[in-house]
Image: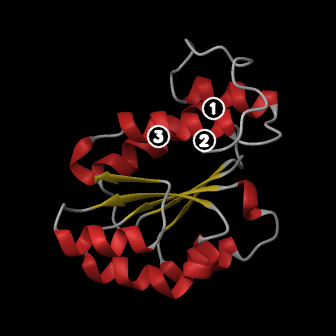
Amino acid sequence: MKVILYGSQATKPLKQLKKELENNLPVGLIDHRKSIPALAKRLKQSGQGQSVVILFISDAKELQSCFSILSLLRKVRLILVLPDRDPETLHSGYRLEPRFIGFSDNGIANLQAVLLHMCLYRRNNDREDLLQMQEALGRRDIESGAHEGARAG
């Protein structure tokens, strides 16, 4: 499973998650895009259905620009990291239909847990991918075979 990170600004949570993943996953499983057009180009490549996209949004304008690629975002598992808890921001974020919404001031622990959960519950999971993701996220306590065959949530 590939992880595609999007963030136009190098926020602390983005840098932390990227570092954790890059230090522990094989080259080629992590990709970072810094603009919506670059993200769109990456998502148009074939075989993106097994990817997880994590959007680190910096402001309301950037969030609105994500709607230009909504059809592409609906084809992947989406995690959204919002800059604030403003009701309008949340409403717009929900319209992107993410599997999880986090906030930039919460750190990366929840993002790591959700990413691992997505890996554990994805159909036809590759045992090697699963073990690599567990290692990358520091979750050696989960038995890799305990959730095989379960449906994605």
Which residue is disc 1 drawn over?
133
Which residue is disc 3 drawn over?
19
User: Could you give the CA–CA distance between mark 3 and mark 2, rounded to whole angstroms?
Assistant: 19 Å
Is disc 2 surrounded by few (<14), some (14 to 19) or many (20+) residues within 10 Å?
Answer: many
Observer able to see residue 114:
yes
SS class of the residue under badge 3?
helix
Q: Nearer the viewer, residue 32 or 93?
A: 93
Which residue is disc 2 drawn over?
118
Q: State the quadrant of the C terminus.
A: top right
Q: Residue at x 41, y 64 (%)?
A: 7
User: N-terminal of the two: label 2 or label 1?
Assistant: 2
- Tag 3: residue type? Lys
Is disc 3 surrounded by few (<14), some (14 to 19) or many (20+) residues within 10 Å?
Answer: few
Q: Nearer the viewer, residue 76 or 136?
A: 76
Image spot of residue 22 (x, y percent): 56, 40
SS class of the residue under badge 2?
helix
Q: Is residue 148 left or right of residue 24?
A: right
Q: Quick check: 5 above or below 145? A: below
Q: Residue at x 52, y 29 (%)?
A: 137
Kindly identify which numbered label has been placed on residue 4. Answer: none
